[in-house]
Image (cartoon, rainbow, N blue to C red):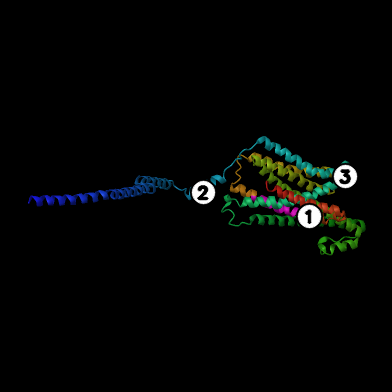
Amino acid sequence: MIVLRYIALAVFAACAHGAGDKAISEIPSLTEQTTRGLHTNTGHIIFQSITEPTPTSSANELSTLESDSEIASSTPSPSPFEQARQSDGECMASGVEDWDRELQIGGVFIILMLSFVGAMLPVMGKYVNWLGNMRRVFVVGKFFGAGVILATSFVHMMGAAIETLGDSCLDGWLGGFDSWPALLAMIALLAMHLMEHTMGRRIARSALSASAESTQSGHGASTPCVDDLPLKETPSRLESHEPSHAHAVYGHMDEHRKRLSTYVLELGIALHSIIVGVTLAVTGGTAFKTLLTAISFHQFFEGMALGTRVAALTFNRRPFLICMLNASIFALTTPLGQVIGIAVRESFAPRAPSSLLAMGVLDALSAGILLYSAVANLLVEEFAAFEFHQASRKMRIVCFAAMYAGCAAMSVIGKWA
């Protein structure tokens, strides 16, 4: 029994020893697997910490967005009444920023001098001997001035009327009709044509009536009145009655017609010059210097065109004084507008509906008057005149080029003024 017990203990010890060696041999692989799993889990945790926001940061961001939305919702949007009140405040704002009194007063005398010199140069060329050789220069200046007036009507006056009457402060005032500037210009043009025709008719009546009276007293016969004859038959019948006398009558009528067209031209120029003067006086800053330069150029050549027309007229009494009076009236119109603008600059609200309507309507009417004066009284008359067709071909080309240059120069100036 003892021997069998020892044999059993020996077998058990041998089995235990084999199992222990196998366990020891499996320990490295188990350690490797454990380490690998630890590394994998650690990397997964680190990646999650980088890519996924923490609950604390998400909560902070959400609270920030909620606070911003609360601030935005707490700020009330302006009501239509408040928006209208703000718009009315902008439209009724008065006064001129960066306004220089000394520069404005100096501008009055600059415009006055250049306007008077431009209008008087052609007159002096007619009555002063040493300026007689410059008559061709004055003729070229007249056509250049005609181009200036034509461009002024289209580019400056019509453009200003469209801009003024299209201002947002006039919403609801014009009935939704956008063509008021063109309509007003057309009305002014037709009114000028009707006025000139009516006055010309009266001049013709008075001239023919005077001719009839002189003929009846001198020869015992009467010349038929213009109202008793058809328009196409009047010249031939008068000429057949007494050719030399009829020629004198129509020469007198033509002189009155030229005088009338010249005064119509001066009326249109004077009206728009006053508007230009007011605009210049209520302009401040660097824009005033630019506008002053443009208006000085414009007034000089516009005065030359008018002065050439005035110098071509014939006056029975004191012709030089009458020509100087016409030049002085033209020269005073823009400074008069400047004085008015200086006087009302503090209370003047340029975007008030009343101011916009007044300026826009006057600009549109001036555009129509200047357009009629430039086309009917300058372009048609001057280019159809007998003296123009008697001039050399070179002189005619120069006159055309001068008119085109006047249009181009004033159009370019329209970019700044």
* Residue 62 percent coordinates (x, y): 38, 47
Asked if the magenta segment contains residue 368, the reply would be: yes
User: Which one is in front, 255 or 208?
Assistant: 255
**Could you tell me how far apart the alpha carbons at marks 3 and 2 are, in whole angstroms?**
65 Å
Amino acid beneath label 2: Ala
Asked whether disc 3 touches disc 1, contact meaning CB atoms under 8 Å apart, the reply is: no
Magenta segment: 360-375
Amino acid beneath label 3: Asn
* Residue 193 percent coordinates (x, y): 74, 56
Q: Who comes first in sequence, dot 3 or dot 1? A: 3
Residue 379 has which mark?
A: 1
Decide: few, some or many residues near mark 1? Use Cα within 10 Å; few <14, some 14-19, many ≥20. some
Overall secondary structure of the magenta section:
helix
The residue that label 3 is drawn on is 133
- In the picture as drawn, the residue positioned furthest to the top comes out as 102
The residue that label 2 is drawn on is 84
